[in-house]
Image (spheres, rainbow, N blue to C red):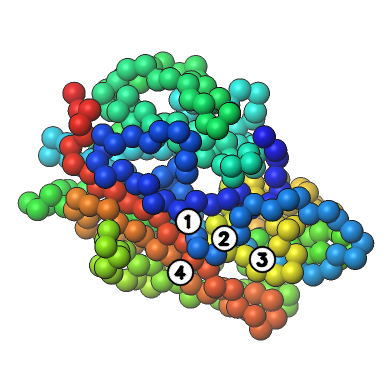
Amino acid sequence: MKKTKNFAKVFSTTAMLATFGALLYGCVQPENSVSSPNTPTSRPLAKKTEEDKGNAQSMMIDIQGPKTFVKYDKYVWSLNETCASQYFTVPGVDPSQYSSIEGEDGLNLSDRIAVTFSDQKCTFWQGGTLSRHNCNGTWVEVSGLPNPAPQTCWVPVPAPVDPYGRTQVTYNITLASENVKVYKGKTTYDFTLKKSDGSQKKMDLTVTLMDGNGTILQVDHPLATYEKADKKKNNCLLDLNYVGNGGSQGTMQDYLMNGSIESILESDDSKSNDDKCNKTAVFRAAPVTYTLGQGNFTLRVTGTLKNVDGSVDQDFSGSMAINMGPAPSCAP
């Protein structure tokens, strides 16, 4: 394994389960990833030289909301991935580093844990004994938590199911942007979403829901509200895990990093980031709500960040797969 400063490889979520009973084997991409067609693959660490000069930007698209559903006993249930991930660990590694340590296959440790609990969804549903998993040479071990009881980490979706078996589901989208400036091999990072003159960058945003055949079902243009980190409110956003999955541009892309915003700012060569809270901001999109029945869906986020570098705009895009399956074959 290697600790990388660069983009973790972001995988397309094309291996969604057709039914709940179909499990993932081996070690492939986790099904909850946000994929982007223009996200660069992992690059070797940049070698700093005094000749290096330029800048680069990347975008992160974070979609929060249930991705995997099952219909059972007049309810729709979703798998809480944060809950499920707590049942597994990679020994000897601080969990805060999981997203920044990746292997030659492009999977980071968080990805490997996601694959592991995805493989054992039935155990979380019906209760039982979890097992360790070898993910391309890296062992993901069971943590010290007790074995799950029936329907552990599966929660009813807090929305009514209509007579047609459909349910309302809401998704929240956060967008962040990393900017790196390089001069004589020295780096300066920020996540302020501001232009060089200090004014706020503007954003156009489109969210599209498509069915399994690619047919557009709904298009929204949610308002994206600028949220600056606020030290007085103890909201510095520094623990936000940044993954540049929306695309990147610029001449110094090898200097772009993944990981917590705090760890990226701490790697800065300048002293301008001593007050990290002033270097962080995000856009929060207004929630989007859908009425979903059984089937496979794709939630696609596209847009443009205006005047990223002078008069240059940055387009970004990413998508997430959603599956609404029938009653699970492993139901008790």
Question: Label 4 amino acid?
Answer: Thr
Mark 3 element type: strand
Say whether marks 1 and 2 touch (CB < 8 Å).
Answer: yes
Residue 247 numbered mark, or none: none
Residue under numbered circle 2: 39
Q: Position of residue 332 (x, y in %)?
A: 18, 23
Q: Nearer the viewer, residue 126 or 305?
A: 126
Q: Circle 3: is it few (<14), some (14-19), or many (20+) Cα within 10 Å?
A: many
At 7% across and 51% down in the image, what residue appears?
Answer: 163
Rendered view: 285 above or below 221: above
264 is higher (above) or lower (below) than 151: below
What is the distance, in whole Å, between disc 1 and disc 4 at their CAs? 12 Å
Q: Is residue 114 left or right of residue 211?
A: right
Report crowding for label 2: few under 14, some 14 to 19, many 20 or more residues within 10 A (C-alpha): many
What amino acid type should be assigned to the residue bearing mark 1? Ser
* Disc 4 crowd, CA 10 A, few/some/many (<14, 14-19, 20+): some
Q: Amino acid at mark 3?
A: Gln
Residue located beneath label 3 in the image:
57
Q: Which residue is mark 4?
A: 302
User: What residue sits 65% from the left and 74% below the top?
Assistant: 308
Q: CA distance from mark 4 to mark 2?
A: 13 Å
Q: Secondary structure at mark 4?
A: strand
Label whose residue precedes the other's in the sequence (3 or 1): 1
Q: Residue furthest toward the left?
A: 163
Mark toward the start of the polypeptide (3 vs 2): 2
